[in-house]
Amino acid sequence: MFVLMTNFLKANLREKYFLFWDWLFPVILMLGIAFFVRGQGYATFLLPGLVTFLLFQTLVYPIPFRMAQFRENGVLRLVAEEGSIKLFVISFLLSRIISSTLQVLTFLPIGILILSPPHINISVWVVLISFGGGLIGLSGFSLLVAVFARTVNSALGFAQLFYIGLSAVSGLFFPIEKSPAFLQVISQISPVTYLRRAFQYGLTGVGDTFIIDIAVLMTIGLSTAFTAIFIVNKELFKRLKP
């Protein structure tokens, strides 16, 4: 498993597309937003949403993209024939979790410095638990998205659809409580909503649904991950039958 994770991490570093979106885009985005709201009360509201937005991005694009590559290149079929598809997928997810962890450890303090939100009340343990719940919830969700992507282009299309759609209805950049009623209802089925609320509680102390948010994230993540692995196993089993 360690060798697989190491190879996946090396592959991430060789992909210029993801190097830009994973490491340069967050800084550009935060600098652009800080130009307008730095030091203002709105910056306090935006910080949890930005952390959620960037974490979602590091999972919903690379996971479907890589899985589609593995499918197109015949890697999944080879793994099913010669090894363990579960071990392969878990190692891949762990490599993305390591990358995402490094990114959050880098960009969270940078975001606080750049945005200078005036009302911060950080609970390290709550932030760590929120991050862990977010990794599980969004990784499982992204893996399920990947299952339905047959090609690299369709993977990017699906990722873009969910990235924009869920970000728009999850209250990342505007209070969902002030949105139309139908958006508030839709937001309740988005894992991004629960992660944003968990981070909000950990970074600002605002909110009273933390335990529920983490429970929902864990439920979504584990159920979607197991569903995705089951679908992949079933699909490959059919293809390998004589």
Image (cartoon, grey):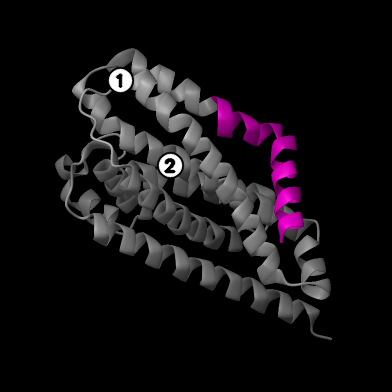
Q: Is residue 66 above or below residue 121?
A: below
- Closest to the camera, between mark 2 and mark 1, is 1
Task: Assess whether mark 1 and mark 2 are in contact (beta carbons under 8 angstroms).
Answer: no
Residue at x 37% of width, y 34% of height = 50
- Which quarter of the image is occupied by the C terminus? bottom right
Residue at x 36% of width, y 50% of height = 130
Predominant SS of the magenta segment: helix
Magenta region includes residue 211: no
Residue 196: percent from left, percent from top:
32, 45
Residue at x 31% of width, y 50% of height = 193
Residue flagged by tag 2: what amino acid is it?
A: Ile
Q: Is residue 39 above or below residue 226?
A: above
User: For the residue carrying disc 2, how many other residues have a C-alpha within 10 Å: few (<14), some (14-19), or many (20+)?
Assistant: few
Q: Which mark is residue 116?
A: 1
Residue 70: percent from left, percent from top:
74, 57
In magenta, the rendered stretch is: 1-24
User: For the residue carrying disc 1, how many other residues have a C-alpha within 10 Å: few (<14), some (14-19), or many (20+)?
Assistant: some
Q: Which residue is disc 2 drawn over?
A: 164
* Disc 1 secondary structure class: loop
Left or right relative to 166: residue 99: right
Marks 2 and 1, the one that precedes in the sequence: 1
Q: Nearer the viewer, residue 23 or 236?
A: 23
Q: Nearer the viewer, residue 132 or 213?
A: 132
